Image (cartoon, rainbow, N blue to C red):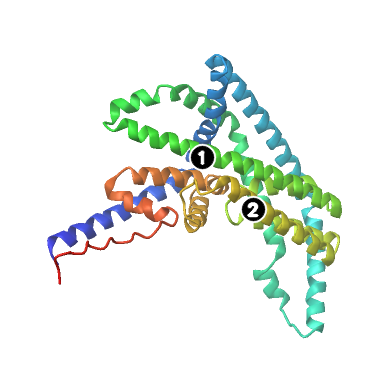
Amino acid sequence: MSSEPKVIVSNLLVSVAAFVIIVAGMKAASSLLVPFLLALFVAVLLASPFNWLQDKGLPAGVALLVVLGLLVLGILLIGTLIGSSVEEFSGDFPAFQERLHTVTAGLLGWLDKTGVHISSELVSAYMDPAKAVKMATNILGGMGNMLTNSFLILVTVVFIMLEAAGFPDKWRLMRSNAEQSLAEFSQAISNINRYMGIKTLTSLATAFLVVILTLFIGLEYPLLWGLLAFLLNFVPNIGSIIAAIPAVIQALVQLGVSAALVVAGGYLAINIMIGTFIEPRYMGKGLGLSTLVVFLSLVFWGWVLGPVGMLLSVPLTIVAKIALDSHDDTRWVAIMLGPKVEPVVASEPPLDENAG
């Protein structure tokens, strides 16, 4: 083997080893890293209304107080809803689980009479519906636990926003091609704000429709199912599925098979209407990520950072893609993370008029 392939293989192994070490460090320090990333993410979201208020003539200090006041109000509202909803459902969960086991046993008995034999031990081990409900409430509880660090997050947001004004000048002193990287960074913030703005509106619409659906059916805990739909709608691809499972199981236990089918059909119709028609129309392809990468980023960041990592998976991957695109050696990785590109058609050589 020549020296050049050896160098390529060596550099690749070093890069992979460094990546593994960084990921292991992030996972080990997730309790410290998650509040900081969440604060940074919130600061990015607040930058647009903060700048808008300043453009309207408000002093920077007053504009900062206004956006922080709205942030605190939102944290208190979400924290109250999550706390009361999870506490109410957790208190009734033992009785719910007992009724669920009774319904499951009845369904297994009916299947057994029709000739379909399924072991109850197999259902308990691999297909226990209570585990799906518990998983959804654990995700909701994990997001709610982050609100216990709200003071630390709020203070960090304040310092980030105060430092943000001087960041471009510092960056120009650090980098020779500062203007290009600042433009890319500004575009990334714009993409993230646009993504989160559209996602917030569609999540609110989803939650509203879910509450209407569950109230119409007569399902217990309608606010819990709406809140679950709102929060999990931020989780790409599988969030809406996870949000639907507990409500369908609750309908099965409380109202029977027909009501469960109606709830499942209602969730399906809501997600098709919003996720297939409304979101793509307004969101377009501005994220610059392939569908596969969005799903893999959900799994990766969820494993590293927990439920909040699932929430931040798309913004974190956008930032990573921009960082990779800024260096020639790693630009190929950014291209692989991006959406489908148009095939490059090789141009044909011009015909020689003197030939033949």
The residue positioned farthest toward the bottom in the image shown:
115
Quadrant the C terminus occupies: bottom left
Q: What residue type is labelled 2?
A: Phe
Q: Position of residue 255 (x, y in %)?
A: 86, 61
Q: Is mark 1 on a helix, strand or loop?
A: helix
Q: Dot 1: few (<14), some (14–19), or many (≥20) neighbours within 10 Å? A: many
The label on residue 277 is 2
Of the pair 216 and 30, the residue shown nearer to us = 216
Residue hosting label 1: 192
Quote the CA–CA distance across marks 2 and 1.
Answer: 20 Å
Choose top left, top right, bottom left or bottom right for residue 322.
Answer: top left
Q: Position of residue 205 (x, y in %)?
A: 71, 44
Of the pair 194 and 130, the residue shown nearer to us = 194
Comparing marks 2 and 1, which lies closer to the viewer?
Answer: 2
Q: Residue at x 35, y 46 (%)?
A: 324
- Horizontally, residue 283 falls left or right of residue 26, namely right
Q: Which residue is drawn at 73% across and 75% down?
A: 120
Q: Is mark 2 on a helix, strand or loop?
A: helix
Q: Where is residue 131 in the image (x, y as percent from the top left)?
A: 68, 61
- Horizontally, residue 137 falls left or right of residue 25, namely right
N-terminal-most mark, 2 or 1: 1
Choose top left, top right, bottom left or bottom right for residue 77.
Answer: top right
- Horizontally, residue 100 falls left or right of residue 290, namely right
Q: Residue at x 68, y 45 (%)?
A: 230
Q: What residue type is labelled 1?
A: Ile
